[in-house]
Amino acid sequence: MVKHLLKLLNKEFGGLHEAALLLAGSMLLAQILALVRDRLLAATFGANSSLDIYYSAFRLPDLLFTTIASFVSVAVLIPFLIERLEKGEEESARNFLSAVFSLFALVMVITSALAYFLMPYIAPWLTPGFDAQAQTELVTLARILLLSPILLGLSNLLGSVTQAYRKFLVFSLSPVLYNLGIIVGIVVLAPIYGLKGLAFGVVLGALFHLAIQLPTLLKIGFWPKFSLKQIKANLSLVKKMILISWPRTLTLSSNQLVIIFLVALASYLGKGAISVFNFALNLQSVPLSIVGISYSVAAFPTLSKHFARGHLDKFIDQIVGASRHIAFWSMPSLVMFIVLRAQIVRVILGSGNFDWTATRLTAACLALFSLSVLTQSLVLLLVRGYYAAGQTFKPLVANILSSLLTIILAFFFSWLFKTNDTWRLLWENLLRVRGLPGVVVLMLPLAYSVGSIVNCLLLIIFFSWDYRLKIGPIFSSAGENLSAAVLGGVTAYSLLNYLSSYFNLQTVAGIFAQGLIAGLAGLLVNVLALWIFGSEELVDIYRAVRHKFWRGEALLPEQTEL
């Protein structure tokens, strides 16, 4: 059995939709475990100050991981490695990897050590609303979590080797094991060590993320070594890699800085605000990961090939096709997440110490995050389109402008909520949270979604200027899919009210059954409407499934945050 398992892990595993569906399967499994993780966290701790400290402790390690590990990410390293491997220059590829490995290890260890000692001075800037005791606990957790960027960075670096040798299954299982490690921390370590047990679980998950790739790397025999000599010998290549990476790194870092700012602002909004914000953010990342990341990553190799060969028409057609399919999946996700938000949150998080107030606030935040599911997914695709064309500056400009806007809007919306009754009552009544404490936290996901929408619009404008992007088919498809999704949403909403008298909504089983039946009926109406509309995307998906998509070849995304 072990022999068969190793054979499967070492198996070598290309069409856009086939690859995207293959990716979606692995992403779905990781996201299911992530939901289990969040349910355990919610049930064990609830939306309180303890989880606020836990989530806040990720901010600096996440920023370090994004800013340093992104220089040695899969997306950057694979072209360098494949170029040498295809020329039969395996020793050159090995030496280059050793140089990158050595530089990364050196920089990450030094930076993490500095962060460890400076953490007591940094913490008050991360969570200015916390009291002295909470700040002390935050420092302790953040120091433990500083091990994670090192382990995950090494894992992503080594993942470039497993993917260069087309061992995709190994890398796809890494995020699954990462979440398993965190679950072990919640179930086994937290009862013994408290919050520190949660941090130990994250480190354990990062170790799992790295460890699963080691047997494959040993079999390949492609193993990096720490060598300062190799850094010097490959300095020109390393410089080239850094020059390619820095705009991408700044783009990712600006996203992290926005989250840091929003969390800092949430620290003033009362106990549990940070937890509610993070739970809703995690829930909205499920369709984003399954749809946006899958299609953008699956499209990247083909986009790179078309642009390199000068086939700009095919390049644009690929962007348009992927955009239409992202709209196909994102629109029903957007509508169903808004309509079924209460059922989703109650089933996934509503247990143990997660009270009714936290449930309603999280559901309302989820609805506001969901407004930008489509645009966030399109941003991922358009950014990779620019990367495939060898341009990294335009995505950076769009991201910085939208990030600044998000920060300004978070301040403005929060101020307006506290000073203008009309604005406050609009959102309280619209999302059915009137009278609840801490409702002002809703302004943070609202600002985040508006910023994401502006980011997408900027990239569409830039892409249209640079490559004459055909935006008509994209908007037409989005409108068609939105119309079908709204019909499905109305069906689901009507059924929710009808079924409420047939199920016991005081139990998880009753809530789940109500939401499941209403959701499936809504999706069925959605599909029927698309069939009547003659949706091209619906036909493409049907063909992709018949084509046995699991035989496809794909490039998997690396983890970009802890």
Image (spheres, helix red, strand yellow):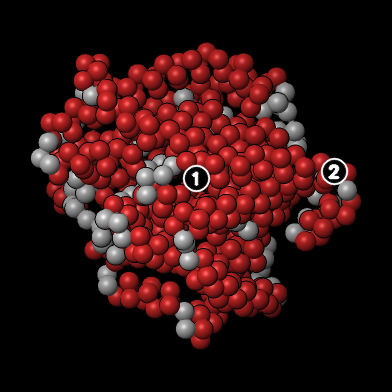
Give the SS element for disc 2.
helix
Give the SS element for disc 1.
helix
Across and down, in percent, residue 91 comes to 12, 31
Across and down, in percent, residue 113 comes to 45, 15
Could you tell me which residue is drawn at 51 percent across and 65 percent down? 471
Name, please, the residue furthest toward the left.
Answer: 88
The number of numbered badges drawn on the structure is 2
Q: Quadrant of residue 427?
A: bottom right
Across and down, in percent, residue 131 comes to 72, 23
Q: Is residue 141 left or right of residue 467?
A: right
Q: Is residue 513 left or right of residue 289?
A: right
Q: Which residue is mark 2?
A: 418
Of 200 and 352, nearer the camera is 200
Q: Nearer the viewer, mark 1 or mark 2?
A: 1
Question: How much space separates mark 1 and mark 2, taking CA atoms?
Answer: 34 Å
User: Disc 1 residue type?
Assistant: Pro
Q: Which residue is mark 1?
A: 395
